[in-house]
Image (tube, grey):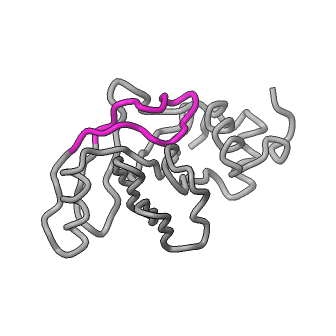
Amino acid sequence: MTSPLDLDPRWRALQDMGGVMDIGFDHPSAWTHGERGAEPFIKVGDDQLASELCRFSDQRFICAALTLAIRGSEDHVIFAIWVKVPDDCFYAYVETFDGGPAPETAVGKLSSELGPVAPLGAAVALTFSDRESRPKAQLFGGATDISLDDLLALYEATGTVNRDDLGSVQ
């Protein structure tokens, strides 16, 4: 099926590069100790960062999956974002790794820089399904889709894709 984006040379170049790439954030925006990179776990004093959980000062964060449709196409992009959550939610989620029941839902605050999609601190609803998958995130009153221009801006800001690799940019 043909997409309106098929007429955009940047979209075609992105497809030639393998298609839409998901974006993952290494750490919450509040984290000041540098990237985790290839390390499975970082501990600095009482602060801790792993791929799915973060404790920074008196704040607790969970990594969640935010899925947004790409306007003008049938594709979507998934963001692995960080959400600041209340302590009780954080510790209930930690218990799922030891076989405990997952919390059903929670409300937190966005702690990943999503630029044009949502501001830092925006309200985020989390839905937990099981311990095998990340919680699903939904922005309250926020975006359910993203434009190609905004996606490309986020790709460039996160170092995922350089706009120059996609040809001419408007």
Q: What is the quadrant of the C terminus in the image? A: top right
Report if residue 17 lies within the magenta region: no
Nearest the camera: 114 or 11?
114
Q: Is residue 76 visible?
A: no
- Direction from residue 83 to residue 161 in the image, left or right: right
State whether residue 52 is above or below residue 79.
Answer: below
Write the residue at 48% across / 71% down.
41
Q: Quadrant of residue 121?
A: top left
Q: Is residue 42 visible?
A: yes
Q: Position of residue 109 (x, y in %)?
A: 36, 37
Q: Position of residue 132 (x, y in %)?
A: 30, 69
Q: What is the quadrant of the N terminus in the image? A: top right
Nearest the camera: 88 or 154?
88
Write the residue at 60% across / 37% down.
3
State whether residue 86 is above or below residue 24.
Answer: above
Furthest-left residue in this view: 101
State whether residue 18 is above or below residue 9.
Answer: below
Write the residue at 26% across / 54% down.
90
Q: Quadrant of residue 10?
A: top right
Write the residue at 16% across / 51% down.
104
Magenta residues (range) = 106-125
Q: Position of residue 156 (x, y in %)?
A: 72, 42
Nearest the camera: 53 or 31?
31
